[in-house]
């Protein structure tokens, strides 16, 4: 693992890797999402209680999974960055945040759209919704703070510190929101996930999740490339400045 | 033992600076009082309503008061070169962070705790619940300070703070707020708030473990 | 290596925000020696000092303190450096005496040494003034005073003579000489010519 990291740490090598890997990742993502959508929309049963609206789940649930998954991967990157001072790890962590925020937003919006027909209201103070909302705010705070740094290296290091700090806090936040929710439980909340889910529903769910995962990989590569290009541009600019 | 003496010297100095008016800790306490008065002024003096929101209101005010003063926790010492001097004097950064947090709690958290029984009278919380309010604040305010240390240190590295610090900090402070005010609500409703208090007191050692480390990293980032 | 230098640098290179500040510097510092770093604005004088103190991580090369890879800003046994940076680290709301006393206690400075320093800088009559009343030059003098009673062997100074008048510059040179003669070592970034014994000059470009 560490070897791969060391190999890719060199920006130009990473750029070559990113350039060649990107189309494949994009292709896998498109294939999985198309398959997932097809299964989800046409080839899975409607829910016996919620009817056709249940199909929102195939976007909502994978997005929520990804919201957490992106944060976890950011945490691992940040650990790499703080312990081994790995410059690429900073950048990966920093570049992940906007993608994670978008997934969280998708989960929130689709959740709200799903809530209207099932709960009869756009928003309930359900523990899960609330903690996803807080996660979204954490992502946004992270993005704002990191972009406040004029020096992108420093910004990326700050990202690592903040991510790690958030990672310690997230379970506590989740726990406290759950606790708070049992005290303020709204009258009728339908449990979103039954203990068992129908296999025909599971297939599109997993297809979509894989598609979303590759969406993350592909866009992460773009973001990192942009970051590296920006740095290169700055370097060239300074070089020119010194020459003149 | 030497470390301990050093620690108290640092704390002493910070408190002395507060007494001398060099920091806005006093203003933060005034803000705390003002914010609590805002609640009856904005939502009416209906005593039954006030009783329900009292715990939450006091906790909100406490949260904002520490948020305000946390923004400057490291800033002035970072900007005038004091932190550089002191870290080169053979004091570890983690010890400095801890001493600053302790001094901040003594000048910000402790007054909030001590004022809370009187304030609970003003805002209409039944007086029999003063102990649980004071207890949650006593357990919660040190955590607020420690959780705030890392974002406060990061704001030194940016050179600007204020709203940005609050933006990062507020979501991280939510558990303390939820458990602190939840304990009071639970106690009033007859469910008993002791479970909340256990959970609240668990946050303190966790933040005590990670905050000094990450806040030190953040301040060093500011120097880089 | 029997003879350990206080500071030994080999191929010292610093890059910040993708910008090369200095590269391949070699120098060493021993007791009773001083290094003067000259160079025009933006040549990296301050960066080099901050590197030596451990505030900036070096990009490549070797930087040894007493033959070991210590960064003074991370090392916490006793002060390795008496530091005079760009900022004075003086609290305006405290009196001059309170400002000094705090560091005196932290460094556990002998009373005799402390009084001597006070005398050299003739600061005794200012002691009970709030530090905010001092002018920029007086603040600089106060920083130099603090620098001079710090028990650390190495003094690192960034533009020590800034804001100082002629008389105080002479005092500065006097304390530098005294320190070097007593076996101390000095690294100083400056624009001016100092007449100090045993000096090595490095020019950054």
Image (spheres, coloured by chain):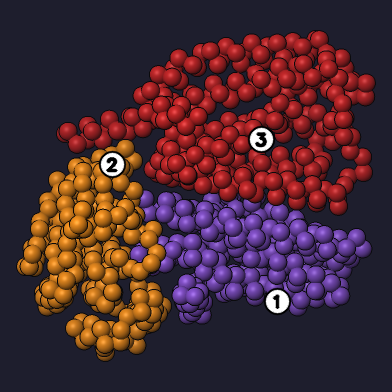
Chain colours: A red, B purple, C orange
Name the chain letter of the residue that bears numbered label 1.
B
- Distance from disc 3 to disc 1, alpha carbons, whole Å, reads 40 Å
Give above or below for C202 relative to B114: above
Which residue lies under the disc numbered 3? Answer: A68
- For marks 3 and 1, give the one nearer the viewer: 3
Quarter where residue B54 is shown: bottom right
Nearer to me, B22 or C5: C5
Name the chain letter of the residue that bears numbered label 3.
A
Query: Do the residues bearing badges 3 and 1 touch, measured as CB atoms within 8 Å?
Result: no
Q: Which numbered tag is attached to residue B145?
A: none
Which residue lies under the disc numbered 1? Answer: B115
Quarter where residue A75 is shown: top right
Q: Position of residue A117 (x, y in %)?
A: 86, 28
Give above or below for A238 relative to A125: above
Q: Is residue A132 left or right of residue B54?
A: left
Q: Are marks 2 and 1 on the same chain?
A: no
Give above or below for A8 relative to A138: above
Q: Secondary structure at mark 3?
A: helix
In percent of the image, x 77 and y 16: which residue is there? A203
In percent of the image, x 10 and y 56: which residue is there? C201
Mark 2 neighbour class, 10 Å CA radius: few under 14, some 14 to 19, many 20 or more: some
Q: Secondary structure at mark 2?
A: strand
Which residue lies under the disc numbered 2? Answer: C60
């Amino acid at each position: 693992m560490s070897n791969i990291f060391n190999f890719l740490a060199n920006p130009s090598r990473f750029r070559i890797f990113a350039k060649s890997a990107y189309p494949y990742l994009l292709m896998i993502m498109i294939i999985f999402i198309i398959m997932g959508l097809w299964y989800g929309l046409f080839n899975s049963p409607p829910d016996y209680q919620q009817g056709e609206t249940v199909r929102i789940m195939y976007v909502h649930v994978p997005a929520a999974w990804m919201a957490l998954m992106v944060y976890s991967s950011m945490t691992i990157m940040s650990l790499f960055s703080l312990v081994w001072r790995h410059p690429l790890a900073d950048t990966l962590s920093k570049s992940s945040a906007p993608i994670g925020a978008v997934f969280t937003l998708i989960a929130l919006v689709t959740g709200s759209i799903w809530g209207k027909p099932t709960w009869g209201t756009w928003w309930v103070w359900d523990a899960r919704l609330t903690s996803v909302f807080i996660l979204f705010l954490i992502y946004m705070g992270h993005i704002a703070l990191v972009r406040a740094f004029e020096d992108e290296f420093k910004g990326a290091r700050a990202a690592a510190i903040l991510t790690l700090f958030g990672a310690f806090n997230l379970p506590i936040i989740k726990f406290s929101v759950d606790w708070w929710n049992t005290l303020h439980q709204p009258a009728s909340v339908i449990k979103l996930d039954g203990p068992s889910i129908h296999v025909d529903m599971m297939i599109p769910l997993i297809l979509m999740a894989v598609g979303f995962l590759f969406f993350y990989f592909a866009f992460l590569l773009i973001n990192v490339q942009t970051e590296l290009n920006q740095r290169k541009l700055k370097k060239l600019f300074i070089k020119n400045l010194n020459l003149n | 033992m030497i470390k301990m003496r050093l620690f108290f010297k640092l704390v002493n100095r910070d408190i002395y600076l507060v007494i001398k008016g060099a920091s806005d800790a006093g203003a933060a306490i005034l803000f705390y009082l003002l914010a609590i008065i805002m609640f009856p002024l904005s939502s009416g003096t209906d005593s039954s309503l006030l009783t329900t929101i009292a715990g939450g209101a006091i906790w909100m005010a406490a949260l904002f008061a520490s948020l305000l003063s946390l923004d400057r926790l490291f800033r002035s010492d970072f900007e005038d070169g004091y932190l550089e001097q002191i870290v080169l004097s053979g004091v570890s950064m983690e010890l400095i962070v801890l001493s600053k947090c302790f001094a901040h709690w003594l000048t910000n958290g402790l007054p909030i705790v001590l004022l809370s029984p009187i304030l609970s009278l003003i805002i209409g919380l039944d007086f029999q619940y003063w102990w649980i309010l004071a207890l949650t604040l006593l357990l919660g305010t040190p955590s607020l300070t420690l959780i705030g240390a890392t974002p406060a240190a990061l704001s030194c590295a940016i050179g600007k703070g204020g709203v940005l610090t609050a933006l990062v900090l507020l979501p991280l402070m939510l558990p303390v707020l939820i458990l602190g005010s939840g304990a009071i609500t639970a106690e009033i409703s007859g469910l008993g708030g002791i479970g909340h208090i256990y959970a609240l007191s668990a946050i303190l050692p966790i933040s005590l473990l990670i905050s000094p480390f990450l806040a030190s990293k953040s301040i060093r980032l500011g120097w880089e | 290596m029997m003879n350990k230098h206080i500071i030994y640098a080999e191929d010292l290179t610093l890059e910040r925000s993708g910008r090369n500040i200095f590269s391949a510097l070699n120098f060493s510092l021993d007791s009773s020696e001083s290094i003067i770093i000259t160079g025009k604005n933006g040549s990296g004088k301050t960066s080099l000092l901050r590197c030596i103190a451990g505030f900036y991580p070096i990009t490549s090369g070797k930087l040894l303190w007493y033959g070991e890879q210590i960064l003074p800003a991370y090392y916490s046994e006793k002060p390795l450096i008496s530091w005079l940076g760009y900022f004075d680290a003086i609290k305006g709301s405290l009196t001059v005496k309170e400002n000094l006393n705090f560091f005196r206690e932290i460094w556990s400075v002998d009373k005799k040494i402390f009084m001597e320093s006070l005398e050299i800088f003739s600061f005794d009559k200012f002691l009970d003034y709030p530090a905010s009343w001092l002018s920029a030059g007086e603040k600089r003098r106060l920083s130099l005073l603090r620098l001079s009673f710090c028990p650390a062997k190495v003094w690192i100074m960034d533009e020590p003579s800034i804001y100082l008048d002629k008389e105080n510059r002479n005092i500065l040179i006097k304390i530098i000489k005294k320190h070097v003669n007593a076996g101390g070592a000095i690294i100083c970034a400056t624009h001016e010519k100092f007449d100090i014994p045993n000096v090595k000059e490095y020019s950054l470009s």
